[in-house]
Structures are given as structure tokens and as C-alpha cells.
Image (cartoon, grey):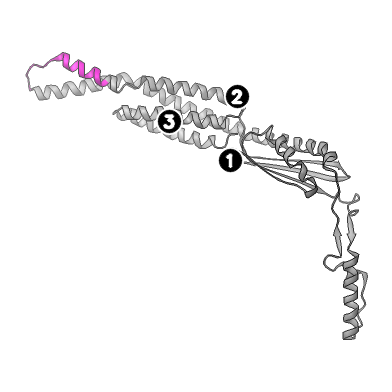
Amino acid sequence: MIRSMTGYGRAESSTLAGKKLVVEIKSLNHRNLESSIRLPVFLAPLEVDIKKRAGERISRGRVEINIRIDSEPGANGGDNLEANLPLISSYYSLMTDLKEKFNLSDEITLNTLVNLKGSIYISEVEIDPEEAWDTIRKALDDSIDSLIHMKEAEGRLLYEDFVARIGTISDYIKKLESRIPQVTDDYRERLSERIRDLADGMEYDESRLIQEVAIMAEKSDITEEIVRLKSHMKQFGEMLNSDAAIGRKMDFLFQEMHREINTIGSKSNDLTISGNVIEIKTELAKLREQAQNVE
């Protein structure tokens, strides 16, 4: 089943140094695979492994991975709060000097000191990247599972749209095929009528008329183009039921289909065929646009 390139996934784990590990992953449309990763500084050595792990399961799109470590609320959530004692001492000394200089009676309270900027801070969690890798990998895999689930759900909608549009194109191709004999007959009739008008009752070479009609029929024959177009349609149907990443292949196949339908349009001077060609081109343009969303 085809996948969309867009999606979102999230996973959590509470087994990393007693803290909550959160992994979020988002995928957007992009011609190739492009990954960007945000994570705590002390986990920077794992960036290459994280990118490789994601690339094993995602083949196309702009992938954004955000990894963070949050304190669990109410469960040792304040263990990493620390007081900046040197800074608090400096604040206290400054405030004492100001009291004496301006003869102030205000008390310097604990509440005053801890509310000053930088007095209390959250210390960094120290975690060994190698020891954390198994936990991070599991959460990363779970977030990718969630992402793929969403991509597949959107892919089913794309699949339905592709099938409907291919069905429409197939109907127009049948109309093209049924029109081929009529085009030759119409040309023969128009040419015969013109010759009769020019001859004005005089005899003319019937074999010459047949020859001209045969030359026209050969020049305007679109049978080969229709055969190739139907072959491309069959390949596309097989692609839709493939589990492989097919976004790029789709784009190439639509280019080939567009080339065939352009040739059909240039060969024929028939208004009915030209009208069908325009309709097919319209559907192909919509298909190519939708293919930009396929992984």
C-alpha cells in the first residue's frame, strides 16, 4: 500500500534516568530524504545513529525529529533544581549595601532572593549516550511506527484518488480507440467530396484517392501510442499495490504517459480525439500533482 509523505508520530519512555523521554517525528513533502534532528547536547553523539535508524524505514520526505527529556511532574520533578549560591550571595551583598546607603528598613527575605533572576536553575541531566541508546532507539522506533500509521492512512486516500483518475483515463483511451476507424472514414469522405467538387463531373483516378487516404491513415495512426499508454497504465496499477517506495517511479511514469498523449494530440486533426486528449492531460496533471505527496 502506498504511503503519504506527510505525517506525525510521538512516543514516550519513563526509563531514562528516572526522567521522561519524549520523541516526536514529523514528515513533510520533499523530493529526496532530508533529516533534521534536535536533541539535548549530551546526546549529540547519537545523532548519526538516530538519522540512520530513521532512514532505514523512511525513504523520502523532509523528516524532523525532536528528542527531549522532561521531568516527571510530582515524581522527583524538582530533584534537578539547584540554587546559584555565588549569585545569591552577590545579590544579598548588593541589597545590604543599598539598604545602608539609602537608610532603608525593608527586610531581605528568602522569598526576595529566590525570585531574583538566575537564583534558582534547573541543572542538566547527566546521561551516558551509549547507555541511553537502547531506550532512545525503542522510543524512536515507536514514534516511527506512529508516523507510518498516519502516512498509510493518508496513503489509502491517495490510492482511492489514483484509482478513480486512472479509471477516468482508461475510459477516454477507449474512446480514442473507437474513434480511429471513424477518423479514416471521415477523411475519405471529405477528400472524395472535395475531389468531386474540383472535378466538376470529370472522371478522376479512384486509386489515387485510395492512396491518399492510406497515406493519411498511416501518418495519423495512433495505435502504437495507445498500446504504450495502456502498458504504462498497467505498470501504474501494479505500482499502486506494491509495498515499495514508488513516489519517484510514479513521477517518471507520468512523464512517459504525458509524452505518449502529446504525440497522439500532434498526430490527429480530429476534434473528438483532441477533446479526449485534453481531458487525459488534465487527469495526468492531477495525478502528477498527487504523486508529489507519495513516499
Task: Indicate left or right for 76 with 225 as reference.
Answer: right
Q: Callout 3 environment at 10 Å: few (<14), some (14 to 19), or many (20+)?
A: some
Is most of the magenta stretch helix, strand or loop?
Answer: helix
Q: Which amino acid lies under the numbered mark 3 shown in the image of this protein?
A: His
Residue closer to the observer: 197 or 41: 41
Residue closer to the observer: 274 or 145: 145
Residue at (86%, 65%) from the top-left corner? 119
Q: Which amino acid lies under the numbered mark 1 shown in the image of this protein?
A: His
Q: For numbered disc 3, what is the local secondary structure?
A: helix
Q: Which mark is residue 242?
A: 2
Q: Which amino acid lies under the numbered mark 2 shown in the image of this protein?
A: Ser
Residue at (88%, 52%) from the top-left corner? 77
Mark 1 highlights which residue?
30
Quadrant in the picture for residue 227: top left
Q: Position of residue 221 (x, y in %)?
A: 32, 21
Do labels 1 and 3 touch, CB within 8 Å?
no
Residue positioned most to the front: 45
Mark 3 highlights which residue?
258
Task: Indicate left or right for 269 with 230 as reference.
Answer: left
Task: Note whether residue 113 is visible.
Answer: yes
